[in-house]
Amino acid sequence: MQDITIWHDPRCKKSRDALKLLEEKNLDIKIVKYLEQTPNEQEIKDVLLMLGIAAKDLIRTKEAIYKELNLKNVTNEEELIKAMANNPKLIERPVVIKDGDAVIARPKENIQKLFM
C-alpha cells in the first residue's frame, strides 16, 4: 500500500468527497485535520514545492480572515506562508500528498494525477 496524506476539513464537502474517493481505493491514508494540526511554515513551503504553485495560489481568498489581514496586494511569499501558518483557514482544501507530489483536490478528480 502507498502512503497518502490529506489535509482535511471534515466540515467541507469537497474535502469529505476527496477523502471518500481515497478510502474507496483502500489506501493507507494519513488524515491531517489541518485546522487542528496546523502545518508549520516549512510544511507549507514543502507542499507549495510539491504543488508547483506560489503561496497566493494556495490561499482561500473568500475567507473573512483574508480580507481582515488585507492580503489582496501582498506578494511576499514568506508573508503569505506565515499568514497561512498562523491562520490555517486560509489554506485551500483539501491537499492530497503522495510520494513527494501533491494536488489540490478541487475537483476531487485531481487526485487521479497522483496515480499516473
Image: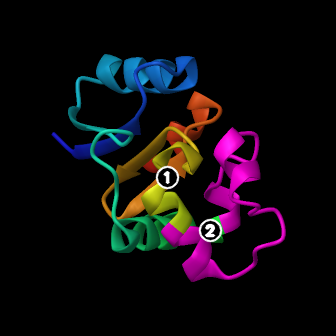
Q: Residue 97 got which mark?
A: none
Query: Residue 83 vs residue 29: left or right?
Result: right
Residue 116, horizontal then vertical, whole percent: 48, 49
Q: Is residue 91 magenta?
A: no
N-terminal-most mark, 1 or 2: 2
Q: Is residue 115 visible?
A: no
Q: Which residue is mark 2?
A: 55
The residue under label 1 is which amino acid type?
Asn
Residues 105 and 37: in front is 37
Helix, strand or loop for disc 2 = helix
| Horizontal side, residue 18 vs residue 39: left or right | right
Which mark's residue is nearer the viewer, 1 or 2?
A: 1
Q: Is the residue 52 above or below the residue 1 in the image? A: below
Q: Nearer the viewer, residue 96 or 82?
A: 82
Task: Report if residue 74 lies within the magenta region.
Answer: yes
Label number found at residue 87 = 1
Residue at 70% in and 65% down: 56
At horizontal 55% and vertical 64% (from top left) the residue drawn is 83
Residue located 49% across and 18% down the image = 17
Measured as percent of width and height from the top left, residue 28 is found at 18, 35
Q: Residues within 10 Å of mark 1 (few under 14, many from 20)?
A: some
The type of residue carrying mark 2 is Ala
Q: Position of residue 95 (x, y in %)?
A: 47, 45
Q: Which residues are magenta?
A: 56-82
Whole-number angstrom distance, CA of label 1 to CA of label 2? 14 Å
With 100 as the anchor, is 31 left or right in this view? left
Quadrant housing residue 31: top left
SS type, badge 1: loop
